[in-house]
Image: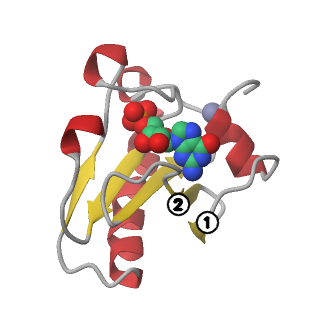
Amino acid sequence: MEDCIFCKISEGSIPAKKVYEDEFVLAFHDIHPKAKTHILVVPKAHTPSLSEAKEKDEAILGKLLLTVQKVAKDQGLSGYKVLMNVNREGGQVVFHLHLHLLGGGKIDLEHC
Ligand code: 5GP
Ligand code: ZN
């Protein structure tokens, strides 16, 4: 997907501080962290938003949550929040589906 920042990060054409990657998903540090640990978990395949996800996306949606679980464990987080902004009215700025993993103390939820 042209002009999609998270597609470019997935392809490696834009750098990011990656913490996990496999065939289907990628996790990397948010460039403007709103918590001590703020990691984004994204599918490699482009889907703009949860509101556009289809039946065929069931597996990848589960995979995203299990990736959050794995990354949180790797980061030593015993508790954390998971957030997904959906569409502009829901605070979504980057239109490539993603989950926010937030933990490690104070979380600036207002700006997530
Ligand atoms: P949204 O509001 O769409 O749910 O969240 C998008 C997130 O992506 C924001 O927290 C923002 O800081 C982060 N972000 C935007 N551009 C980049 C980038 O180029 N690199 C990284 N690592 N994070 C980004
Ligand atoms: Zn994309």
Residue name at image x 51 percent, y 48 percent: 42
| Residue position marked by numbered label 1 in the rendering | 18
Q: Extreme right residue here?
A: 13
Determine the secondary structure under disc 1.
strand
Residue 59 in picture, x, y percent from top left? 43, 49
Residue 64 in picture, x, y percent from top left? 41, 55
Does the Cβ of the disc 1 residue fall within 8 Å of ligand 1? no
| Residue position marked by numbered label 2 in the rendering | 27
Marks 2 & 1, CB-CB < 8 Å contact: yes
Q: Is residue 33 left or right of residue 108?
A: right
Residue name at image x 42 percent, y 21 percent: 52
User: Few, some or many C-alpha atoms within 10 Å of disc 1 (few <14, some 14-19, many ≥20)?
Assistant: some
Dot label at residue 44 = none
Residue 3 in picture, x, y percent from top left? 73, 24
Instruction: Decide which of 65, 37 is in the foreground and name it.
Output: 37
Residue name at image x 69 percent, y 49 percent: 10
User: Few, some or many C-alpha atoms within 10 Å of disc 2 (few <14, some 14-19, many ≥20)?
Assistant: many
Mark 1 is on which residue type? Lys
- Where is residue 88, by image quadrant? top left
Determine the secondary structure under disc 2.
strand
Residue 91 in picture, x, y percent from top left? 31, 25
- Where is residue 98, by image quadrant? top left
| Quadrant the C terminus occupies | top left
> Ligand 2 is in which quadrant of the figure?
top right
